[in-house]
Image (cartoon, rainbow, N blue to C red):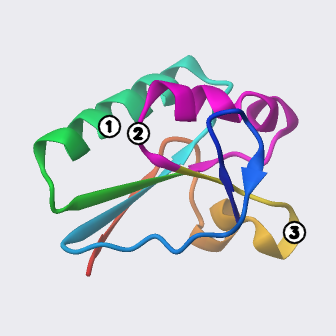
Amino acid sequence: MERVSRDGRSSDRETVSGGGVTVVALLQASSVYSRQHALSLNELTSRVSSVNVVGVNSRHTLSRLMASQLTQLTNLTILQSGSGLKDAWSRLGGLKDDVFIYDS
């Protein structure tokens, strides 16, 4: 997966790490509800410092084109899901707006 920068371009891979709890949210930048969901998760990170939230944007064309909206709205790490074996949504068995919580 690639990290999406604020200008919408992909950047080098980054390791997402931290202490406490990691939340992985499957987002679709083209969906108003997903963007609101991302804002709520962003607020969570501002209130609870031990929570690390990572958003994974959908691989669909419109969502890929709108990925920068997620990074402009929030301070979350947004990763861009790829196609084929790199598709995080398929690997996780998740759907739009699903949230996975991992204790680290």
Question: In the depicted view, which residue is nearer to us: 65 or 75?
Answer: 75
Amino acid type, label 2: Asn
Q: Residues within 10 Å of mark 1 (few under 14, many from 20)?
A: some
Q: Residue at x 87, y 69 (%)?
A: 84
**Image height of 24 relative to 64, above or below:** below
- What is the secondary structure assignment of the residue under circle 2? loop
Amino acid type, label 3: Gly
**Image height of 100 relative to 59, above or below:** below
- Whether residue 29 is in magenta: the answer is no
- The image's mark for residue 42 is 1
Q: Position of residue 68 (x, y in %)?
A: 66, 32
- Dot 2 or dot 3: first in sequence order is 2
Q: Give the magenta-colored segment's residue range.
A: 56-77
Q: Position of residue 58 (x, y in %)?
A: 70, 45
**Image height of 77 relative to 28, above or below:** below
How many dots with numbers? 3
Q: CA distance from mark 2 to mark 3?
A: 28 Å
- Dot 1 or dot 3: first in sequence order is 1
Write down the residue under mark 3. 84
- The image's mark for residue 3 is none
Q: Image quadrant of residue 20?
A: bottom left
Q: Image quadrant of residue 11?
A: bottom right
- Whether residue 75 is in magenta: the answer is yes
Q: Are marks 1 and 2 in contact (CB under 8 Å)?
A: yes
Q: Residues within 10 Å of mark 2 (few under 14, many from 20)?
A: some
Left or right side of 11 for 33: left
